[in-house]
Amino acid sequence: MAVLAMRDALNQALREEMKRDESVFLLGEDIGLYDGSFKVTRGLMKEFGEKRVLDTPIAEEIIIGTAIGAAMSGLRPVAEMMTVNFIMVAMDQVVNAAAHIRYMFGGGTKVPLVIRTPGGGGHQLGAQHSHSHENWFAHVPGLKVVAPGTPADAKGMLKSAIRDDNPVMFIENEGTYAIKGEVPDGEHLVPLDKNEVKRPGDDITICAHSRMLIVAMDAATELEKEGISAEVVDMRALRPLDMAPVVESVKKTSRLITVEEGWRSYGVGSEIASRVYEEAFDYLDAPVARIAAAEVPAPYNKRLEKIAFPGKADVIVTAKALLGKN
Amino acid sequence: MKVEQRAADSKSKEALTDKTSLLNLYREMLLIRRFEEKTAEMYQLAKIGGFCHLNIGEEATIVGTISALRRTDYVYSTYREHGHAIAKGIDPKAVMAELFGKETGTSHGRGGSMHLFSEENRFYGGYAIVGEALPIACGSGYAINYKETDEVVMSSFGDGATNIGAFHESLNVAKLWHLPIVFVCVNNLYGMGTAVNRASAVTEIWKKACAYDMTSERVDGMDVLAVRRITDQLVARAREKHEPSLLECVTYRYRGHSMSDPDTYRGKDEIKEWQTRDPILSLGEHMKKQKLLTDEEIERIDEEITSQVEDAVKFAEESPDPDPKDLYRDVYAGEGAA
């Protein structure tokens, strides 16, 4: 077991899957010669050549479209969208094509495609580079959506995503690429449809995915010092959404906070809250609290940006409020 | 309207003179015509739902291009694709059954008129978003190069699609990556109800390829032999040299954009004028002059094909609807579907 940064764990997964299966290839903007905007694809063009690591024009629709057609024609493309904000240009291909093709063609074909793309703010990149849109994709039947928050899960889920026969939105986060953690060597597969408790606790449940998982874990550590035992559930599997560990946890703690980096309205937390109301209403002692980004286009100013995105302090304050300990 | 053709290489003109080849083209075109006429009838009887776009008038363009392909070559098309599907070898029964929404249809009743598909015939689908299929066709082209096989991709779309970004992105990478694709623009002069000259700064679509330094041709899309000759050359170019090309076929749809189009944006005289250049009648006349076909044969072929279309309707009528318990089938491939 090695300690790897998230970007290197992803890189390892890509390298291993490319070695394992000749039909796996990568395409995206500056992923080859440039080694990738966030260096996730570092060294891969050198190792596998230009056919298997394809630098594309800065034209998102052709990237996703090419990936879909290649997937239908027997390959296993892994497309990189430099940030999730840019994928808006290719939404027709993602939703009307990738997600719907299998069903609208009566199961006559499949689209084994992975779209890797980071979201997330906090880098003073303003309104067109900073958002998180995983909920948009998680709304769509035909897509799978995952958002791991640890290097080990990043590797294991990316490998599973590449082997899956469906289009998988693989959501990364710019703020996690340097985060380090232990990563199992070689064959390490994490299922795409299983959420899990990352930290056990008794008093309150905190649900989070991607970078917010780290925020939630940090908050739980702080809360522990104040005598509050928080259970953290990693919501890495967003579609299909595995609710079992959340429901189980809520039955124990009776209080739930959801944390996400995207906007609150119609968000991941809204869906989780609804399902908890449906499946564990009688166990709740308080309404579900949703922590999310301020509903503004991400501001550039550092101070404004800091308050626009959720952080550890928000989780701590909310947890205490839910427990009546403020 | 007289279509000015580009001066195409005339080398292969002699290739299409034998009776069998010509008769095949004739039968294919007539099959599409009779199929579409029957489709209109079934739509009016409410046997077919949704939108329904007919290929009537465009038979020479469809058959002239697709007959130049092998079964293993890929065809991508649009929502006006019944004819393309049939020309690519899909049984008219399965096409009609899909229009009827039946389980025996090409897409098991999940797709309908606009979403026909066949892996077996490499008919890679009807797409209902204008321009959407061109980038996807590029993906098949990339896969062919990747696997080092010798198939060709034909991506068929309307004149309207050439104004959308996806068209330009596709031509760019096709040329850049040497993809074996023939882009076929079915220029029927209208994008829905908007004439080409009201939507496109360049009305001769073939010219748009020059921005990508791509071979392009313009052909009379009502003349099946002309279409076939030029397509043969472009397909060979794609297969042998991995050079993409753009072919503009100038043609006309006799019916409205869809079955629900009252057709108020063009004159009746214009429609009549185009009908005087009917692709099926023209080929019939040509063959009669060459003593390759008689009126009696024409009548017999028509009877055969009409009965084939009747069989397709009967098959569709008698086929079962999809089972409601299968509503969620094929949202996802494999297990673990949500």
Image (cartoon, coloured by chain):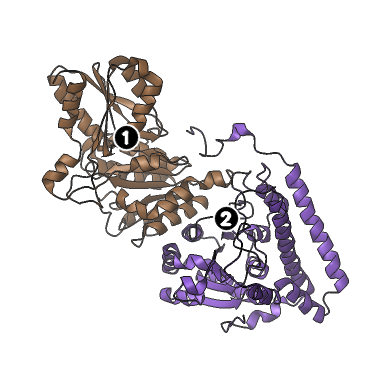
Chain colours: A brown, B purple
Asked whether, in this view, residue A53 is left or right of residue B116, the answer is left
In this view, A326 is above or below B226: above
Image x and y of residue A169, in percent: 38, 43
Question: For residue B260, which quarter of the picture?
Answer: bottom right
Image x and y of residue B263, in percent: 61, 65
Quadrant where the N terminus of chain B is found in the figure: bottom right
Mark 2 lies on a secondary structure that is strand
**A323 or A187, which lies in front?**
A323
The image's mark for residue B221 is none
| Residue at left offset 48%, top offset 77% | B207
**A55 or A309, which lies in front?**
A309
Residue under disc 1 on the same chain as residue under disc 2: no
Asked whether, in this view, residue B118 is left or right of residue A170, the answer is right
Mark 1 lies on a secondary structure that is helix
Residue B305 makes an appearance in the image: yes
Image x and y of residue A240, in percent: 42, 33
Question: For residue A295, which quarter of the picture?
Answer: top left
Labels 1 and 2 touching (C-beta < 8 A): no
Q: Amino acid at mark 2?
A: Gly
In this view, B215 is above or below B259: below
Q: Residue furthest right?
A: B296
The image's mark for residue B126 is 2
Residue A25 makes an appearance in the image: no
| Residue at left offset 47%, top offset 45% | A99
Q: Chain of mark 2?
A: B
Q: Amino acid at mark 1?
A: Asp
Question: For residue A315, which quarter of the picture?
Answer: top left
| Residue at left offset 54%, top offset 66% | B193
In this view, A315 is above or below A286: below
Image x and y of residue A189, in percent: 38, 34
* Label 1: how many Cα within 10 Å (few below 14, some 14–19, many 20+): many
Q: Which residue is mark 1?
A: A153
